[in-house]
Amino acid sequence: MAISQAMCTSFKKELLEAKHNFTAASNVFKLALYTSSASLGAATTAYTTSGESSGTGYTAKGEFLTSVTPTSSGTTGLTDFNDLTFSSVSVTARGAMIFNEAASGDPSVCILDFGADKISTAGDFTITFPTADASNAIIRIA
């Protein structure tokens, strides 16, 4: 199994179909954690429980993302989220998936590969998002 960092191909198509709206209160984006046994990448189309992390304090389907703020920089459209902390958890994760929980079928947005297992033992597990600019934003379309 493998986790490959990518913007999901289905997400690109679904943007053209107006399935995702990053400013609508009715669209709820979440981040779920996954172990190295998960098989996730550009071809991932939706949230899956296969390979999802589990542990004390971690809830299936992860946590809500906040402060979705679409903007542009030069010729690039981008959006950002506030850093996310899973508080007081015992969990191991190799990667994560951002998905739209409010849309039918929980469609995937992107896959994150941490490069190695990250472990929290009865502590905080924090996802720090990159700078929201045209070169680094977690979701950007050039």
Image (cartoon, rainbow, N blue to C red):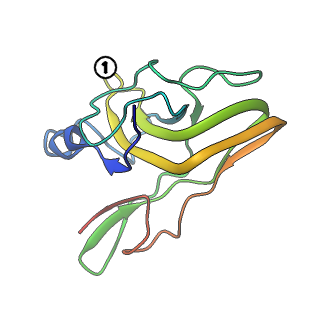
The C terminus: image quadrant: bottom left
Q: Is residue 137 left or right of residue 62?
A: left
Can you say whether 121 is above or below 9 in the image?
above
Q: Residue at x 27, y 30 (%)?
A: 45
The residue that disc 1 covers is 105
Residue 1 x, y percent position in the rendering: 39, 31
Name the amino acid, label 1: Gly
Q: Quadrant of residue 18?
A: top left
As drawn, the residue found furthest toward the bottom would be 74
- Height in image: 62 above or below 124? above
- Residue found farthest to the front: 1
Q: Is residue 88 left or right of residue 24?
A: right
Residue 30 showing in the rendered view: yes
Q: x, y percentage for residue 113?
A: 47, 48
On screen, residue 46 above or below 110 = above
Nearest to the observer: residue 36 or residue 137:
36
Residue 98: x, y in percent?
44, 40
Where, by quadrant of the figure, is residue 100 drawn? top left
